[in-house]
Image: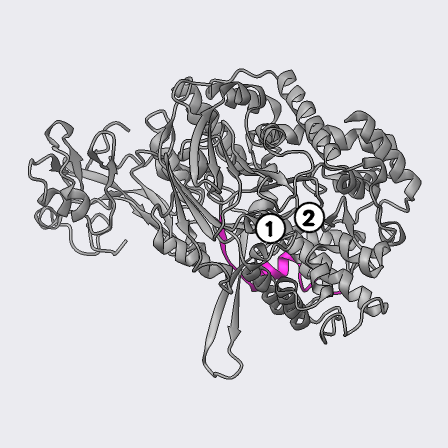
């Protein structure tokens, strides 16, 4: 690390004592770079075994990496905590302005300890940390409004991140998210509920500084190569244009688009909710994370008339991507795009994770169809695939929790199905609701084995699609080996906090050169070793908190609904899981 | 690019300035801001002469704030030490050794385009080099040549409507 680089400074904040201090830990960053590598090490230090995820003993750790502020697309912040959703490793990544703001404030990581006794928001401006009363913001109906208030009240426009929770976080819905810059989320595994449990409404972070480089000319050359690859090459074209929703139609054509709680993998309404259709009829603006020229964030403009006021309209600007279209579109049988976007708006207003919410509502609908729950449980709300208004109301009730049933839904499908039955079609993996791919066994194995139980862990859908293309059947051991190789390399990217969308740009040699500019000499072998070790540490944490890969629940539905890569059974999945376990 | 001026026409100085061509194409990536700092060989954002901020939340898009090289710059009017020297064609150059750090210029700019260097206690003045524009992937900003001033134009026989004429196009 170069002299004057503030990366190794860790800001500690104690919400109970309202105190803060900085510790400098260069050895930590030299060993593990930043992001996920640092995050898991700090989580081991900070989170006591068996901690209550919603207790003051659960820490929140944000970490960034050496390339942030130096190179494009190093734009993510990694959050680590113990998850209130599945009770083990909580890890979620978000972009927006968060990573650059933390780095410019002069930190490589921020650790938040304890809980406040009354609602509070934090303002971090470089070295200054302020604890501000958030009583008046607590309980506001819309998460958007809280963002507007903070934007007006605090300084640093253009240079700050404003992370905040909605009512879902305040009510500790186990899959509540943290929203940053309106359109980016620490979406998965319930960081919003951890904020809520600490009565932490928001964090505003800003700062300005320069970062040293080892060689000015080499810096500009390396920068130009990465910038050019990110903007001009084919590698990132799909994210530029239609964005990830370009996947909707191809997935549907191959029979891999989870539909109506995965009762089918083809959706007759796919055309209506496709990336092409959304771009043609609704795309209103594109937005980027700080220092990312790609601008993958697609916003739909939806003009809504007021039913009783002629000539009165509002226009919503809503982010959409493949996972959102899957979770609130095909999974809920919605072909009505305005209805789907209004549901997304409600999910944003409440501050829920859209993916988990969609899967929860899909499960509840099927449970109702099968008579496992009735209008008594739903408090008179009939849930039916395709009915957007019912889903909008249900999303509100998940947060308000008027009945026992909604309290169960607020804990996800794993829990709700343990109470009401229907586990066979409760689509969660390691307690986390399913992402939008049903390509074959490898995608599900990715969700089952991934440390975050996310589609981003190891991209198993790529293996399924590869097998279909080549016409070769998948073998459990080979799938496990390919998944772990991918997941290990992604630990490196997540430690650098390079966006996974840029994984084609940041190959090992590019990473090595970029790190050298930041004064860190790493070989390819060092990087691979970090990937291996980081994944192993995550698994050690998961095991410590009770996760057992051998016992992970496999919902029967995924084996019943045909997938493009052909039929697979539990034996196949278990063999692959066993092999993965050996390799970790 | 060290000398932002080029010579053209009848030996007249034609300056360059940054022009915000279409702010509605701005995605808020701030690649321009990083470029401004990187030009001097550093990473980070401190010292950037160009600024991108949301226009009141990301839902509303962005604003790009950069010196527009006024033909009659208000920042120069209020400088008590003549540290901001008018540039022919428009805009100013900072004579750093004359600057006493009063900050009048910052307050005088109606666009808020002058950032303050907290360490040096001096204004950060755009040098109209155009390095930032090279990194704008969406053609939001560009380096544009500006014609002679109105009086100079009249003298040289350049009339309104000539693209070299420095008109008030509102950009």
Placement of A365 over or under B4, stated as above or below: below
Does residue A493 appear in this view? Answer: yes
**In the image, is residue A455 above or below residue A277?**
above
Left or right side of B19 for A429: right
Residue bearing the label numbered 2: A85
Q: Are marks 1 and 2 in contact (CB under 8 Å)?
A: yes
The image shows residue A207 at horizontal and vertical percentages of 37, 37
Image quarter of residue A570: top right
> Where residue A68 sits in the image (x, y, percent)?
48, 32
Residue A232 part of the magenta segment: no
The N terminus of chain B lies in which quarter of the figure? top left
Q: Position of residue A446 (x, y in %)?
A: 76, 39
Q: Which residues are magenta?
A: A267-287
Q: Secondary structure at mark 2?
A: loop
Q: Residue at image x 48%, y 38%?
A: A14
A59 and B47: which is toward the camera: A59
- Density class for disc 2 (Cα within 10 Å; few <14, some 14-19, many ≥20) is many
Residue name at image x 45 percent, y 61 percent: A145
Q: Chain of mark 2?
A: A
| Comes first in the chain, label 1 or label 2 | 2
Mark 1, residue position: A193
Which one is nearer the viewer's eye here, A244 or A570?
A: A570
Element under label 1?
Answer: helix
């Amino acid at each position: 690390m170069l002299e004057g680089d503030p990366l190794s400074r860790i800001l500690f904040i104690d919400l109970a004592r309202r105190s803060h201090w900085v510790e400098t830990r260069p050895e930590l960053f030299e060993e593990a770079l930043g992001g996920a590598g640092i995050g898991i090490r700090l989580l081991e230090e900070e989170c006591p075994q068996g901690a209550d995820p919603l207790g003051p003993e659960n820490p929140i750790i944000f970490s960034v990496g050496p390339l942030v502020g130096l190179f494009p697309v190093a734009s993510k912040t990694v959050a680590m905590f113990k998850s209130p959703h599945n009770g083990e490793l909580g890890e979620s990544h978000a972009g927006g302005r968060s990573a650059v703001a933390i780095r410019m404030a002069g930190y490589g990581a921020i650790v938040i300890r304890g809980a406040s006794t009354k609602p509070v928001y934090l303002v971090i401006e470089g070295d200054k940390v302020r604890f501000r009363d958030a009583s008046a913001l607590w309980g506001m109906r819309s998460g958007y409004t809280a963002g507007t208030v903070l934007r007006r009240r605090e300084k640093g426009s253009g240079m700050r991140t404003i992370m905040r929770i909605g009512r879902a976080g305040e009510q500790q819905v186990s899959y509540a998210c943290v929203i940053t810059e309106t359109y980016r989320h620490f979406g998965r595994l319930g960081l919003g509920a951890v904020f809520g449990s600490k009565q932490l409404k928001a964090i505003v972070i800003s700062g300005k500084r320069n970062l040293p480089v080892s060689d000015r000319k080499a810096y500009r050359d390396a920068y130009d190569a990465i910038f050019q690859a990110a903007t001009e090459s084919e590698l990132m074209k799909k994210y530029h244009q239609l964005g990830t929703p370009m996947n909707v139609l191809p997935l549907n054509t191959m029979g891999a688009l989870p539909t109506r709680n995965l009762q089918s993998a083809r959706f007759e309404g796919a055309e209506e909710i496709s990336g092409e259709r959304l771009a043609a009829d609704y795309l209103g603006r594109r937005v980027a994370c700080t220092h990312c020229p790609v601008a993958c964030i697609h916003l739909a403009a939806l003009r809504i008339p007021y039913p009783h006021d002629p000539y009165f309209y509002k226009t919503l600007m809503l982010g959409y991507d493949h996972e959102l279209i899957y979770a609130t579109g095909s999974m809920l049988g919605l072909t009505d795009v305005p209805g789907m976007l209004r549901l997304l708006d409600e999910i944003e207003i409440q501050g829920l994770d859209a993916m988990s919410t969609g899967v929860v509502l899909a499960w509840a609908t099927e449970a109702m169809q099968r008579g496992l729950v009735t209008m008594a449980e739903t408090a008179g709300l009939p849930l039916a695939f395709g009915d957007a208004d019912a889903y909008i109301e249900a999303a509100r009730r998940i947060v308000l929790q008027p009945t026992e049933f909604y309290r169960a839904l607020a804990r996800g499908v794993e829990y709700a199905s343990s109470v009401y039955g229907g586990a066979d079609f409760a689509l969660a993996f390691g307690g986390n609701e399913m992402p939008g791919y049903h390509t074959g066994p490898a995608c599900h194995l990715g969700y089952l084995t991934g440390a975050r139980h996310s589609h981003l862990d190891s991209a198993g859908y790529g293996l399924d699609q590869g097998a279909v293309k080549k016409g070769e059947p998948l073998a459990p051991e080979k799938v496990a080996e390919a998944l772990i190789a991918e997941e290990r390399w992604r630990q490196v990217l997540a430690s650098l906090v390079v966006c996974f969308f840029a994984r084609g740009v940041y190959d090992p040699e590019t990473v090595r050169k970029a790190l050298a500019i930041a004064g860190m000499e790493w070989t390819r072998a060092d990087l691979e070793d970090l990937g291996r070790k980081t994944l192993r540490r995550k698994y050690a944490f998961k095991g410590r908190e009770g996760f057992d890969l051998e016992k992970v629940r496999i919902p029967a539905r995924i084996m019943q609904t045909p997938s493009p890569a052909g039929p697979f059974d539990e034996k196949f999945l278990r063999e692959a899981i066993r092999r993965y376990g050996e390799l970790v | 690019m060290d000398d932002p001026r080029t010579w053209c026409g009848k030996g007249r100085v034609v300056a360059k300035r940054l022009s915000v061509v279409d702010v509605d194409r701005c995605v808020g990536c701030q690649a321009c801001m990083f470029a401004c700092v990187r030009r001097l060989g550093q990473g980070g954002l401190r010292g950037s002469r160009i600024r991108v901020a949301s226009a009141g939340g990301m839902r509303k898009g962005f604003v790009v704030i950069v010196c527009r090289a006024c033909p009659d710059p208000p920042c120069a009017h209020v400088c008590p030490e003549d540290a901001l020297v008018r540039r022919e064609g428009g805009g100013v150059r900072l004579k750093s050794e004359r600057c006493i750090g009063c900050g009048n210029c910052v307050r005088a700019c109606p666009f808020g385009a002058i950032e303050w260097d907290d360490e040096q206690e001096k204004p950060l003045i755009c040098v109209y080099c155009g390095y930032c524009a090279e990194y704008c992937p969406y053609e939001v900003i560009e380096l544009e040549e500006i014609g002679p001033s109105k009086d100079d134009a009249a003298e040289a026989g350049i009339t309104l409507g000539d693209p070299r004429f420095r008109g008030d196009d509102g950009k």
